[in-house]
Each structure stands twice: as C-alpha cells, then as structure tokens.
Image (spheres, rainbow, N blue to C red):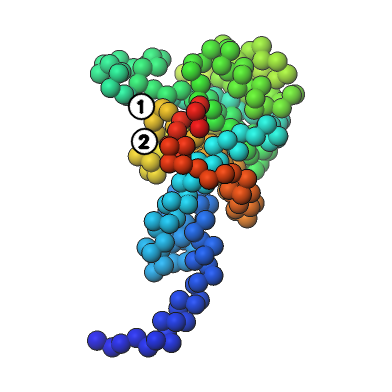
Amino acid sequence: MRRLRSPDIGYRWDHHASLQAAAHCLVLGRLSDGHPLQRHLGSATAAPARPRLLQDGLANLRQLRRSMLAPGRSLLAGLVEVDETEIACRSKNDPVTGGGGRSHQGKMLVVGAVEVQDGAGPGRIRLTQVPDYSAASLHAFLAANLAPGATAKTDGWSGYPGAAGVTHDPHVVGTMAAHIVLPWVHRIFSNLKVWALGVYHGLRRKHLQSYLDEFVFRFNRRRTRHAAFRSLLGIAAAHQPLTYTMLISPEATA
C-alpha cells in the first residue's frame, strides 16, 4: 500500500484547522440538511467533531429557550394566517382507544401564525403550545404574537373573534381542504411534524415548547445564516454555565 507523504497530511489538516474551530458551534442550516459540519467541511472531517457538536448544540439550543421569547422581539404584522394543529403523543396515562376526531386525548395542541408576504412566500412564524382551543387561549396567543392592527386570517373557529387590537378575517373551510384556505400555516405545520419525526423521532410534552422555539428560530433565520450565528453567540455569552439538570428541565422550571 502506498504511504501518504507527511506534507500532504499536514496540508490537509492545516487547511481545515480554522474551519474546524468555528464549526463546533454551527447549529444552523436548513431544517433537514443533515449534519451541519459535513455540509461545510466535507464528510472526511465530520466524524471526529460529532460528539463536541452534539454537546455544544444541546447547550446552545437549551439556552435559546428563554432568549427567543424576549419581550422586545417584533410582533407579526400585516396579514397573518393563524390556525391550530395537533401532534400525536400517547403516554401510558392515555387510553388505548379514543383520541379520534376532535378529541384531545393522546395529542399535544399547538397554535401557529405565519406572516403572509405578497408574492414572496411565508415570512416570520410563531408556534406556541396551548392547553385547549378556547377563546382565552387563542386570544392570549394573538395578543402575545400579533402587532396591533394586524389581520388574523383564520378558518372561522369560534375562539378567534373578539381578540383585542386584531382584525379577524374568517374563511370557513367547510368541505374544502384546509390547506387551500390557509396554505402557508399548514405548510409550516407539515414541515414541523416531518422535522420532529426525522430529527427527534417524536416530541414529548414537557419539552414541546423548547422544540417549537428551536423550529421557529431556525425557520425565521433560514435566509440569514450569519445573523443566526451572531444571535447564537450573543445568547451563549449572556448565559451562565448550565448544569445537566437545568438543560433537561421543562420550559416551566428551567
């Protein structure tokens, strides 16, 4: 077998040394692009850094939990599609039968909103876990995520009318497919569920809001990777070291 010359090895390592140092913190990219280091540096250098990437990525994403919900972030404005969806999650306490139709047994309830940009596809999004689809829950979501004067385009569900500062634009679905009336928010729901199954092999109740926040962070910065990287650096620098118990704590107690 022909032996590689040492200068070749040194050159290859030096060529990637600076990139490897930066790649430890990369958790950006499209929602289903695969391993971030492999995309940027190639398959030959992906394997050695995988444990460190996983550790750093977990810490950064858990730190995002609070920071992504900062009160100062701008609210969704203009025309905003709003709808609800359900993610299956049957625990040992849920009955084996049941949960069909409009039943909430064995399901996690999520409400989402998407800014609609004329001719440019979806803009920013918001996703929040809710206990039910009552007017109290939906109005709280609208107040926290939609700017005053925004128009909420919905499927006509009775929980939306009456929200303060928001114009309600109902479009009753009826026998029509829901994605015809509200195409962008349903595409977001579809991407969310595929991402959850492909990356995490399913979501769990106590960490659901953290997963939703991660998805929102990635989606809203999908076209501005440099801004996303700066955001991660700023968030990491502003946090004190976290213990393992803090990392795995649910949103309500972290």
Q: Is residue 43 toward the left or the right of residue 122 in the image? A: left
Within 10 Å of disc 2 (Cα), the crowding (few <14, some 14-19, many 20+) is: some
Task: Give the quadrant of residue 166.
Answer: top right
* Any part of residue 138 in sight: yes
- Amino acid type at mark 1: Cys
Q: Nearer the viewer, residue 21 or 107?
A: 21
Would you say the residues marked 2 and 1 are in contact, meaning their CB atoms lie under 8 Å apart?
A: yes
Q: Which residue is mark 1?
A: 89
Residue 204: percent from left, percent from top: 39, 31
Within 10 Å of disc 1 (Cα), the crowding (few <14, some 14-19, many 20+) is: some
Residue 100's disc is none
Residue farthest toward the right in the current orientation of the protein: 149
Residue under the point 65% across and 25% down:
144
Per the model, the C-alpha gap separating discs 2 and 1 is 8 Å
Residue under the point 47% across and 37% down:
246
Q: Which residue is mark 2?
A: 202
- Amino acid type at mark 2: Gly
Seen in the picture, residue 181 relative to 219 is either above or below; the reply is: above
Give SS at disc 2: loop
